[in-house]
Image (cartoon, rainbow, N blue to C red):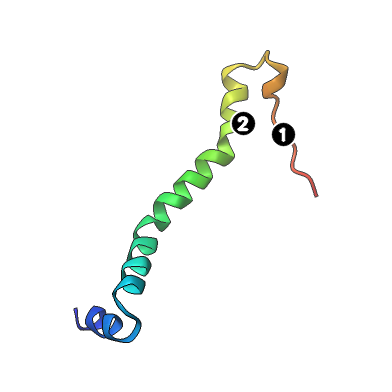
Amino acid sequence: MDVWLSLIKDVGFPAVVTFFLLYRIEGKLDELIDSVRMLPTAQHSARPDDPLLAPVEKQG
């Protein structure tokens, strides 16, 4: 608790709230990124006959 109070005094309440919220949603953002990356593969396996859903090869 003392750490939070010293941060509020040093950088201000809005900055502390921002850091706290970013820390809280970091794990959820990682899950979202993984889900978006797996989406083309999941769509292709659900509808393998559709040429528009073919897996995209990585470039570069």
Give the answer, above or below, for where 60 lies relative to 52. Answer: below
* Quadrant of the image occupied by residue 25: bottom left
* Quadrant of the image occupied by residue 9: bottom left
Q: Are marks 2 and 1 in contact (CB under 8 Å)?
A: yes
Give the answer, above or below, for where 5 lies relative to 41. Answer: below
At which x and y percent is residue 10?
Answer: 32, 86
The tag on residue 56 is: 1
Rounded to the nearest whole Å, what is the CA distance between mark 2 and mark 1?
7 Å
Label 2 crowding class (10 Å Cα cut-off): few <14, some 14-19, many 20+? Answer: some
Secondary element at tag 1: loop
Report the residue at 63% width, 23% height from top: 44
Report the residue at 74% width, 43% height from top: 58
Secondary element at tag 2: helix
At which x and y percent is residue 23?
Answer: 37, 63
Looking at numbered disc 1 in the image, what kind of residue is underneath it? Val
Which residue is more in the foreground, 58 or 29? 29
Check the picture and name the quadrant holding the N terminus.
bottom left
At which x and y percent is residue 40?
Answer: 61, 31
Looking at numbered disc 2 in the image, what kind of residue is underneath it? Pro
Left or right placement of residue 45 versus residue 28 in this view = right
Q: Which residue is mark 2?
A: 40
